[in-house]
Image (spheres, rainbow, N blue to C red):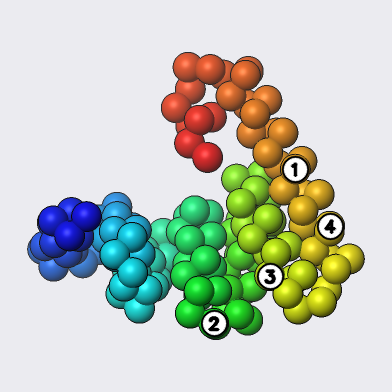
Amino acid sequence: VHEAAQSFRAAVEADPGHAVAQRRLGFALKSLGDLDGAAQALRAVLKAAPQDVAVHNSLGLILNQQGHLEEAVASYRAAIEINPVQGAAAHNNLGTLLQQFGQLPEAEHRWGKFVGAEKSLQRAVEFRPDDAEAHKD
């Protein structure tokens, strides 16, 4: 993973606006435990691609791990607002975080949305088994 992170970092240095390289750098840094670097890379992705549901969710996970709980909630909510079905994982992660805040009714609501979104994604895969986009999430 170190070598991959170095390669992605070199790609980002060559082209700071390269959202795919930034995204992969963020995920590699997260795998290495560099949460600050990962958060910085994912925030850069969101400047270039603010509609990236997976990046909002991943940033939420990192912020949660760092103890930035309000920011994590905002990141999960952003993913859900962009696309409630593709944001299935964000529903689940938000529900778990809200449970920690003692907000059980909304947490249960989010978990219900997670189950519904997962079912929708499964139906998309069944309906379009050869479509890579259907398998993406």
* Residue name at image x 77 percent, y 41 percent: 116
The answer to which image quadrant residue 23 occupies is: bottom left
4 or 3: tag closer to the N-terminus: 3
Mark 1–mark 3 Cα distance, whole angstroms, equals 17 Å
Residue 77 as seen in the image, left or right of residue 20: right
Q: Which residue is mark 2?
A: 67
The answer to which image quadrant residue 71 occupies is: bottom right
Nearer to us of marks 4 and 3 is 3
Task: Residue 15: give x, y in percent of width and height.
Answer: 16, 62
Task: Residue 18: give x, y in percent of width and height.
Answer: 24, 58
Question: Three-letter amino acid code at disc 1?
Answer: Val
2 or 4: tag closer to the N-terminus: 2
- Is residue 13 in sight in this rendering? yes
2 or 1: tag closer to the N-terminus: 2
Task: Residue 57: give x, y in percent of width and height.
Answer: 53, 60
Nearer to us of marks 2 and 1 is 2
Q: Residues within 10 Å of mark 3 (few under 14, many from 20)?
A: many
Q: Which residue is mark 3?
A: 97
Q: Residues within 10 Å of mark 1 (few under 14, many from 20)?
A: some
